[in-house]
Image (cartoon, rainbow, N blue to C red):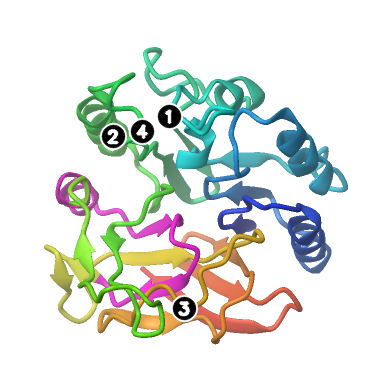
Amino acid sequence: GFTALIFPDSQSANYSGWQQLSREAYKRHPESAFYVNMGDLVDNGQDVSQWRAWFNSVSLFSDAVPLAPVIGNHEAYSLEWKECLPASYTHLFNVPQNGLAKYPNQFYSFDYGSVHFVVLDTNFPEMKKFQPDLLADELQWLEKDLAASKAPWKVALMHRDIFLYGFGPESGRAQSKTHFLDFSYQLMPVFEKYKVDAVLTAHLHTYRRRVPLQNFAPAPQGEGITYILTGVAGSVRYPKLWGDFEWDAATAPKPETANYMTLTADEKALEFKAFLPDGKQFDEVKLTK
């Protein structure tokens, strides 16, 4: 078995909060085999000073603990805040070279213990001009990758969530309904076809664990995929923006602050726990086979 640390979006105006959260999380879980950042590592993907602050924040443990990075949309912004190829991100991180050469370091997969992880690029809107075939090519790669895996557990990591939540009553915005994003209709059937167990997402800076889903609806008892929107680890917060949703089985305490997660796995169980910055646990789910 093993434990991994999971950090949501760490983009910040000031990275001191991210530094404290990440270091305290590692102190509490020094057994962690690796850590994940779920995308939007920095606020501006081509700003060298932000990358320097990010790397400095994890410097106490980054030499000893590998990172599995996930690309976010903020990695694809230029210094002028225009969409661009994620050049800094793709040059800064050494990830498994089993994606497609056409998309260097943007998506990949790896096995650790009993788990097969697929790490996806969901920057479909940002890459429309630069990589118009990203979704189609990635889907084809994903099918082959998942079909080849014999691991007991399969977990997908991707920045954008499957939903866009409706705005909450205190947001000051016109009310809207929670709905699936277009790419979800293509990705989710692939996850179901190859029996992915859990999908972790980020992007919306809120923590939501959903009831297990199957065929775009709550699944029958004992079936379905566990989708967890992992929260926020940086200083950019949207405390009153998103509304409640009936498929949410668990949320973070209000008003939402930063959080982190752990993933623990062995041959028979896959367990996720969510923690506040002070180490207080506020959610957990255990999947068994």
Q: Place residue 67 in its image quadrant.
A: top right
Horizontal side of residue 174 vs 2, given as left or right: left
Q: Is residue 187 magenta?
A: yes
Q: Which mark is residue 83?
A: 1
Judging by the rendered image, the residue that carries numbered circle 2 is 142
Q: Amino acid at mark 3?
A: Lys
Disc 1 is placed on an element classified as loop
Q: Are marks 4 and 1 in contact (CB under 8 Å)?
A: yes
Give the CA distance from mark 2 to mark 3.
Answer: 35 Å
Picture coordinates of residue 26 (x, y %)?
78, 60
N-term-proximal mark, 2 vs 3: 2
Q: Place residue 161 in its image quadrant.
A: bottom left
Q: Amino acid at mark 2?
A: Leu
Query: Which of label 2 and label 1 is nearer to you?
Result: 1
Q: Are marks 2 and 1 in contact (CB under 8 Å)?
A: no
Disc 2 is placed on an element classified as helix
Q: Place residue 186 in its image quadrant.
A: top left
N-term-proximal mark, 4 vs 1: 1
Classify the position of the N terminus by image quarter.
bottom right
Q: Residue, x 28% and y 61% (percent of image)?
A: 163
- Start-end of magenta stretch: 185-212
Pick the residue in front: 156 or 24: 24
Pick the residue in front: 269 or 74: 74
